[in-house]
Amino acid sequence: MATEEVVCDPSLCTNPDSPGECCGDSFEHKTTPGLCGKCYIVLTSSENADKMKDWPQCQGCSAVYKLLKASRCGTCVKKDPQITPSGPVPPLNPQDLNRPPNQSVTDKLQDLQAENRRNAMSARTLHKGSQKTSGAASSVIVGVAKGAPRQITVYLAPGTANTRTDASRILGNATRSFPEDIAMNVCILQDTPVAQGKTKKVYKVICEGMPWVAKRFFEIGAGDEQVEIQQNADFLVQEATRLGKTGYYLGQFIAEAKRRNTSIDDTIAVTEFKLGLEVVADDSAPSPASGISLEAYLAADPSAVQVLWLFEPRRSSAVDHWSGTNEYPPWHQNKLGSTLNAFAHYVYQISQETTVITDVQTSKAVNEQGDGINVLFDMMLHTTNGASGVGDHGQNGINTFVAKHECVRRCVGLRLDQEGFENALKGLEDGDSAAEDDD
């Protein structure tokens, strides 16, 4: 019996050996089946990958050029002289920085929505300006088998955490701001999660030619997949804010250790992250991975619906846990663990006893210099107002940290205030005694 030969479209970036491990984009003038130029460089461990992975790529033939000046190379422009490459999304003007956050973000979204309309996207999704840091647009290809990777077009922007006044620097207050420019990328998002924790699901995604993961909430106490669209967005923004705060605290901690000439594990870093808003194509449902049905999407308030994702670089799946939600081992004999223990003490003190980092975990990665690092992610906080996000136990969580924290040598080297801990603990004990007397 004759076998039917499967013919692959050479214009598509494909990876038969590992479906999904490619950008999946379409290049009109690409004539060789398989990976596009950039994915070939990134995924085949070419000796030139490190220096070539950031070179611009021709959107016509997929070739990579160091000094490419437009979206298409000269050869492709000659083939299609009538095509004029579209310009980037207009950047945020400097004067926007002095506007109220709500206004500048709303203005920025109008630019995004205009771009979406030019690309036949839906413009029904709006930001709640004071709560957002980025936008993303998603156009899902239909007719793909369940569980397969889907091609989406995404606007992504890095999360930011800025500090303003001296008081803000002390407290580590983070202000969310819309970025000055937003890059549009074609990504490949897997339908099914590669991992999940107690509250979030994690999906593989190839974005900007690099392996990332996309996260969303699926459980916040109401049951499996009982998270409303806006709840997911709000909690992801809170998570991004926690990452921003932790990054600020960590920078201050490392600087203080250097000033005090105290030895710490200096391989610690906070994960890079990006927030993206998925704007669904007309008459289509959000991406299957989002967990949002067409009915739920259409029933949501058009002025508030926000299908949000949190993107992080893909790292090792092996995770090291250093503290729990309310457990704080000292790790006396472990340099990384004891450094993170001292870091928790430092955060409590520099925040004027208003914040505690908790449920601390790291995964291993390699930075741009080729050095091994330990990356903090999925940060949780206990704060005095209990409003930092999922898992915040408020003042009770802070009290538990004060009662259970055991200072290590690095706490002493950093001159962290043990007396302050003792006074705080005494205050807790006095409060308990008073409560017993009332009984």
Image (cartoon, rainbow, N blue to C red):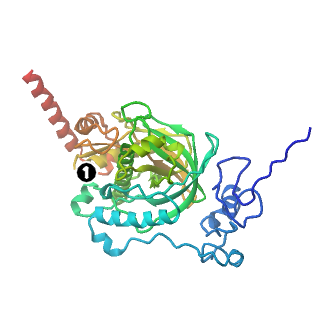
Judge left or right: residue 210 versus residue 319: right
Q: Is residue 431 above or below residue 157?
A: above
- In depth, the one of 115 and 147 nearer the eye is 115
Q: Position of residue 423 (x, y in %)?
A: 17, 40
For this orientation, the residue located farthest to the right is 1
Q: Position of residue 195 (x, y in %)?
A: 53, 38
Tell me, yes or no, if residue 273 can be seen here. no
- In depth, the one of 123 and 279 nearer the eye is 123
Tell me, yes or no, if residue 366 can be seen here. yes
- In depth, the one of 271 and 212 nearer the eye is 212
Which quadrant of the view contains residue 361? top left
Q: Is residue 41 above or below residue 407?
A: below
Q: Position of residue 212 (x, y in %)?
A: 55, 51
Q: Is residue 431 above or below residue 230?
A: above
**Badge 1 element:** loop
Which quadrant of the view contains residue 4? top right
* Quadrant of the drawing holding the N terminus: top right
* Quadrant of the drawing holding the C terminus: top left
For this orientation, the residue located farthest to the left is 438
Say which residue appears at 60% left-offset and 72% top-offset.
71
Q: Which residue is mark 1?
A: 351
Judge left or right: residue 347 versus residue 309: left
Identify which amino acid the numbered label 1 is placed on.
Ser
For this orientation, the residue located farthest to the top is 439
